[in-house]
Image (cartoon, rainbow, N blue to C red):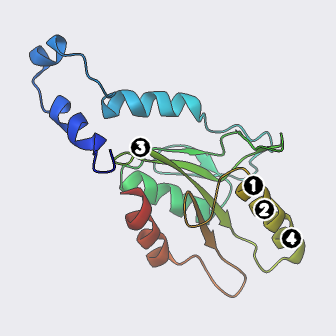
Amino acid sequence: MNNYKANVIVRQYEELCDGRKKLVEPIILPNEDYIKHWNEKYTGGQNGYQINNGIKTNKGEMVRSKSEKILADLFYKYDIPYQYEPAVKLDNGKTVFPDFVLLNIAERKTYYWEHFGLASDDEYTMKNLDKLYYYEKSGIIVGDNLILSIESEHNALDVTLVEKQIKEHLL
């Protein structure tokens, strides 16, 4: 089972012509269907906190900051399924709204992406350290299925690092 690659079976099915697909019942959902179900599970735009002066992404959605636009546009560029600010219920019963939830299609693994854009602000940082603690207690762990990007007043978002994370975890 450790050597089992679901994407190989999915690819075999997806390469069939439409006529043959009608005759075959796939044992693993095709990527298109899997992504559809995944999008239904992680509905974006659930954060009730109003987006004032939002910025429109290339996908056509509104985000809160220029950095979130850069991130969303990169996910869109690389054709990574994502949702912006979906509701995620943690094990402690609290609902959080991660900046992005993303799908690695090949692995069929969900990743969470938090962007800390005000890391220079002590109160903001403490609040987000608490959030990371509760994420970890709920199985959302930095280096496994949680990706972070950080910027402060002295350090802008590093797009090169973001693209490295995308290529390492999401493609």
The quadrant the C terminus occupies is bottom left
Residue 130 versus residue 2 in the image, above or below: below
Residue drawn where x is 65% and y is 64% of the image: 115
How dense is the environment of label 4, judged by Cα within 10 Å: few (below 14), some, or many (20 and up)? few
Residue 128 versus residue 91 in the image, above or below: below
The circle on residue 108 is 3
Q: Percent position (x, y) of residue 16? A: 11, 27
Q: Tell us which disc is closer to us: 3 or 1.
A: 1
- Helix, strand or loop for disc 1: helix
Q: Are marks 3 and 4 in contact (CB under 8 Å)?
A: no
Residue 155 position by quadrant: bottom right
Residue 148 versus residue 171 in the image, above or below: below
Q: Nearer the viewer, residue 132 or 77?
A: 132
Q: CA distance from mark 2 to mark 4?
A: 11 Å
Residue lying at the far right in this picture: please name it: 123
The quadrant the N terminus occupies is top left
The circle on residue 133 is 2
Q: Are marks 1 and 2 in contact (CB under 8 Å)?
A: yes
Residue drawn where x is 83% and y is 39% of the image: 93
Q: Amino acid at mark 2?
A: Tyr
The circle on residue 126 is 4
Residue hosting label 1: 137
Q: Percent position (x, y) of residue 76? A: 42, 51
Q: Nearer the viewer, residue 121 or 2?
A: 2
Q: Tell us which disc is closer to us: 1 or 2.
A: 1
Q: Percent position (x, y) of residue 97? A: 72, 47
